Amino acid sequence: MDSGVLIVSSTSLETFIQRVVDDHALATGIKPLQTHYDIVDYAAKSGYEFGFTDWARHLALDALKASDDDLDQMLRADPVHWSWAFRQLSTWRNLLMDGAASDGLRPGLSPASPAAVVQPESESEQDAVLEAFIAVVKQQSDLKDRVKSARNQDEVIELAQSMGYSIDSLTLLRRWSQVSDFSKPTWFGWFDD
């Protein structure tokens, strides 16, 4: 933070983004961040105030301009890896050295085109795909929140398929009792919390 000065203006977000590029100490501070809320909170603690919706809007506009490869890296970035925050914006992705290209990326979680989703054939393969999806969701709070807020199984299936996991309603029904705690409502039974 610049000697306790709080920067509040319409350009506070853009200033913060550029300061991360220009100031090594500020850039180092984004390494442990794992969510977009963390980024906005870190900016505020560093003297740059802007709303979460401002951040989300900027992020969305930046993503619209991103190449398929950059968008793939942004979506596959592992939130527990130090490079996660750097991968969220094109301006910050440019700070990553060439050697960091594949470090910190989750395998197989790129947005799936219909051709990229492999259809498991046997019931055991389908069950394994569902269990792999649940394991990934349990590790990522943003995905866990999306699953918990799903209104029906179709939304959960759609999320899984967007991540390359081909599951269907029959697999959910067949495996439900083995992966769910029935004392909790709907999908909450998948999680310990």
Image (cartoon, rainbow, N blue to C red):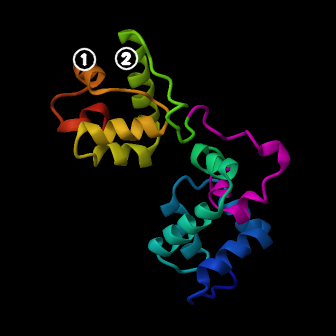
Residue nearest the viewer, comparing 39 with 124: 124
Question: Is 16 left or right of 177, judged from the image as shown?
Answer: right
Amino acid type shown at disc 1: Arg
Where disc 1 sits, the SS reads helix
**What residue lies at 58% left-to-right and 72% top-to-bottom?**
43
Report how far apart the C-alphas of labels 1 and 2 lie in the structure: 8 Å
**What residue lies at 78% left-to-right and 59% top-to-bottom?**
94
The C terminus: image quadrant: top left
Q: Is residue 94 magenta?
A: yes
Question: Is 144 left or right of 84, judged from the image as shown?
Answer: left
Q: Is residue 47 visible?
A: no
Q: Is residue 84 magenta?
A: yes
Question: Which of the labelled discs sits on residue 127, or is there none?
Answer: 2
Where disc 2 sits, the SS reads helix
Q: Residue 15: which quarter of the image?
A: bottom right
Residue nearest the viewer, comparing 8 with 105: 105
75 to 108, vertically: above or below: below
Query: Crowding at label 2, few (<14), some or many (≥20) Cα neighbours within 10 Å?
Result: some
137 to 13, vertically: above or below: above
**What residue lies at 84% left-to-right and 47% top-to-bottom?**
98
Residue range in magenta is 83-108
Q: Which residue is mark 1?
A: 174
Circles 1 and 2 in contact, beta carbons < 8 Å:
yes
Q: Earlier in the sequence, mark 1 or mark 2?
A: 2
Q: Is residue 22 visible?
A: yes
